[in-house]
Image (spheres, helix red, strand yellow):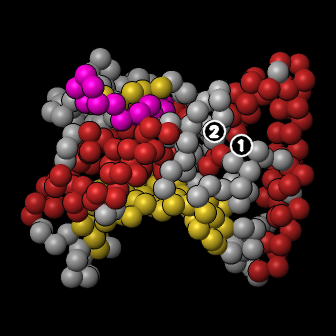
Amino acid sequence: MEFLDSFDFYNQYQKKATTQAFMCWDKSADDELIVVAFRGTETFDADAWSSDIDLSWYELHQGKKEVHGKVHGGFMKALGLQKSHGWPLIYQKDDEKPLAYYVIRDKLREILQANEKAKFIVTGHSLGGALTILFPAILAYHDDDLLLKRLQGIYTFGQPRVGDKEFGDYMEGLFSSYEIQYLRYVYCNDIVPRLPYDDKSFMFKHFGKCLYFNTFYEGKVVAEEPNKNYFSPWYTIPQTIPQTLNGPDYKEPGILQVLRVIGQVLFYIYIHDLHVFRGPRASNKYSFIIFF
């Protein structure tokens, strides 16, 4: 693939560049394919974590009547939500403070208009997966028929929940009308796809097709990963053992296995303490902050 560009995008709410992505272009096939990839949360990146735990709701309106549901505010801000302006179709370009959605949209439009056969996909992991699924949502919000017709697929890995049921229904209708393939890959022991919680307090919902892989890396298509709001070390620690049976390509170094066990035990102790002394709602809130 031909490397096109990499980006450090500006977040107007954090007042710094905290969102990263890159683009590449496969010209080898008859139907040229452009790949847009959003970066996930870095382990020690406090700014990315701030986006993850910003649980404010943002409502997508078009006019006074039509509502497309509620969306995770932190992810919207990381994608390029503008202070006091929301998502205007036309924006004031600032090369010193580029916004992810607008820069990628304009670059894609330029390439696709010059190449009639070219299509594109969007992908990302963790936080990047959340930005991946929200990118076409804003394209639809702007009625960007050109890009939506050339969007071949959306593939996310370890993606958290991004909105409520109304938003999910809207997105499924959008993908159906434009024949866009959406696949959400989930590994069994991953906590991130189980956050934010799908319960009466948070009301976040997954949507689309989930490709779920168990601890033996055997995949199956499901509507929702098992234990959608539950994560226990006593369930996950034993499941790490079979990873050593599939050969060196799947085996974790000893230090990572130790850290996995320690992290899960500390997680269990912490949420148990919060549950006892502060109640289940506090437990959900703080366990989300820790693990995201």
Residue 156 visible to an observer of this rendering: no
Q: Residue at x 45, y 44 (%)?
A: 168
Position of residue 116 relative to residue 208, above or below, is: below
> Looking at the rendering, in which quadrant would you find the C terminus?
top right
Is 260 in front, or is 186?
Answer: 186
Q: Under tag 2, what secondary structure?
A: loop
Give residue 97's position: percent from left, percent from top: 29, 32
Graded by Cα atoms within 10 Å as few (under 14), some (14 to 19) or many (20 or more), the crowding at tag 2 reads some
Q: Which residue is mark 2?
A: 198
Residue 32 visible to an observer of this rendering: yes
Position of residue 107 relative to residue 155, above or below, is: above
Give residue 107's position: percent from left, percent from top: 20, 52
Is 287 on the left-hand or right-hand side of 148?
A: right
Q: Amino acid at mark 1?
A: Asn
Which of the 4 quarters of the picture holds residue 118? bottom left
Quick check: is 73 in the magenta stretch? yes
Question: Extreme left residue here?
Answer: 114
> Could you tell me if the residues under marks 2 and 1 are in contact, i.e. CB atoms within 8 Å?
yes
Q: Residue at x 26, y 45 (%)?
A: 139
Is 146 in front, or is 104?
Answer: 146
Is 256 on the left-hand or right-hand side of 223?
A: right
Is 235 on the left-hand or right-hand side of 194?
A: right
Q: Which residue is mark 1?
A: 229
What segment carries the magenta color? 62-76
Q: Amino acid at mark 2?
A: Asp
